Amino acid sequence: MRPLVLQVDDLAKRYGATIALEDVSFALNAGEVCGLLGENGAGKSTLVKALSGVVSPDRGEIRLKGDRFRPTSIVDANRLGVSTAFQELSLVPSLSVATNLALPDAPKNAIGLVSGRELRRRAEATLADWGAADIRPSDIVDSLPLGVRQRVEIIRALARNPSVLLLDEPTSALSDREWLFGLIDRVLKEGVSILYITHKLDEIRRLCRRCIILRNGQKVLDQAVSEMSNDDIFRSMAGRSAVEQFIAAPSAARPQDVPALEASHLTGEGIEDVSFALQPGEILGVAGLEGHGQGPLFRALVGLHPLRGGRIAVAGTARGLHSPRVARAAGVVLVPEERKTEGIFKDLSTIANISVPVIRRVSPLHFLNKQRERQLVEQVIPDVDLPEHFLPLPITDLSGGSQQKAVLARALVVGARCLLLFDPTRGVDVGAKQSIYRMMRAFVHDGGAILFYSTELDELVHLCDRCLVLYRNHIAGEVSGGALSQELVLSLASGQAAQAQPIAGGSP
């Protein structure tokens, strides 16, 4: 029998009238990975924050190796033996990788100053030890791709040698899950207990013998994974039976039309001679491993990334899309990668987050007409399945899935005809994913066009009419029709395919 490491009894937390956790109890044994599942808003994040010292529970008891555990901060929790890799990264973006790995105890020299040489030496050793020698300690975190930042977040949590490791959606931005799975196997042999929070059932089945499911702040299930089907898991999470994972629909692409968005020989930092044509009614996928040009491409299309050459045309007319505002006026809207830092205005209400790009239309003589604002917003929220009663709430009170729906509603309220969706389902639950899939299908059915990047290859395979595959900053190939498979996409993305597929209509 493995020794008990973490014991949680009757944990409860409220925010006003909202119940975040209610009487949650569970235990973790040494060398065990326990999955934690639940829809967005089920209480997972609050539980992680309570265990990490971010929030104090209103009631209940936590014991770590038999001792009462009541951390007052993340640093306190780390010192006591609980370390967390957060989905919403806790790294300091303006500091280097080396400094972030050392915080809060940076090495100092004889006169009490932080030793830069020792800082770099320790960081190099730490990164190499955890299989990330390719990351440079001197790089500023904010300059790194999201997937690299997530690796640094995970390494920092592992390097603290915790007794309990909390991994919150750890693969949501990783292009190589096997790297993480190998590290998990390593620390399990050392007796570390892991609480693994994810929406991905394949990861639960691969890593966890047991999983806990929360719904509406309460534990509704604590059971062996082998004893449950996927439908059993979804029913416990959502209180209803599973819906289809993907919504089958015939292609609405109209190849005889003028392309909705056309890129010709785009070249810039991170992009090399990229050309494609996106048709009205089409979902055109973009696949690529982390750092192969997908981020610069999407940002360049709305003026957020400088180009050295190339041409962009919208509905057949060459356009200089020098800023998101200009792109939006042309009907091209980007839904960015990082919802928390790039997608939402944290100090505003949900309705204000949606209406902000059209605020002038509802502000005659510079006075906000709230009735007209609400009328505009109410026209689009059904398209993303966002409940009307969420509109007056601060957007930070919403779950991640509902926040993403608000970001998508903002894109629709401006009348976009071409959506650039960069990993829009990252970190959202199964129900929210279905809402996003339905919105995408309805959007292209009505004549819109979508350029869609996802880290989940099955989404690209099932939702897209065609898929462009990026490798080393250029298009390595295009896959469509019956040839569109995860295996071929991954082969092209890894540079392993002997022959790239011809780019049908992709070189205007």
Image (cartoon, grey):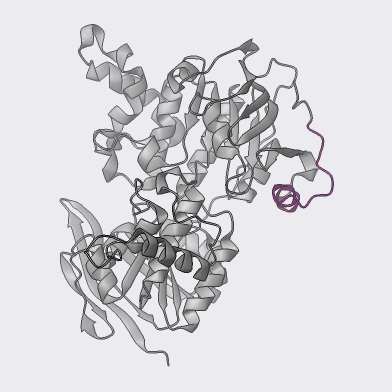
Query: Where, by quadrant of the figure, is residue 409 drawn?
Result: top left
Q: Closer to the camera, 403 or 453?
A: 453
Residue 505, above or below 242: above
Residue 97 coordinates in the image, percent (x, y) = 41, 55
Q: Magenta residues?
A: 487-503
**Residue at screen point 46% across, 83% down:** 190
Q: Is residue 23 visible?
A: no
Q: Is residue 94 left or right of residue 425?
A: left
**Residue at screen point 52% across, 77% down:** 186
Q: Is residue 210 left or right of residue 462?
A: left
Query: Where, by quadrant of the figure, is residue 78 drawn?
Result: bottom left
Q: Quadrant of the C terminus?
A: top right
Residue 170, above or below 94: below
The residue positioned farthest toward the bottom in the image shown: 1
Q: Is residue 173 magenta?
A: no
**Residue at screen point 54% across, 62% down:** 133
The residue positioned farthest toward the top in the image shown: 365
Q: Is residue 354 visible?
A: yes
Residue 444 coordinates in the image, percent (x, y) = 60, 27
Q: How many marks?
A: 0
The residue positioned farthest toward the front in the image shown: 111
Residue 448, above or below 235: above
Residue 114 coordinates in the image, percent (x, y) = 28, 60
Q: Quadrant of the N terminus?
A: bottom left
Q: Is residue 489 magenta?
A: yes
Residue 223 coordinates in the image, percent (x, y) = 44, 75
Q: Closer to the camera, 42 or 100?
A: 100
Q: Is residue 76 left or right of residue 136?
A: left
Q: Closer to the camera, 141 or 198?
A: 141
**Residue at screen point 69% across, 38% down:** 467
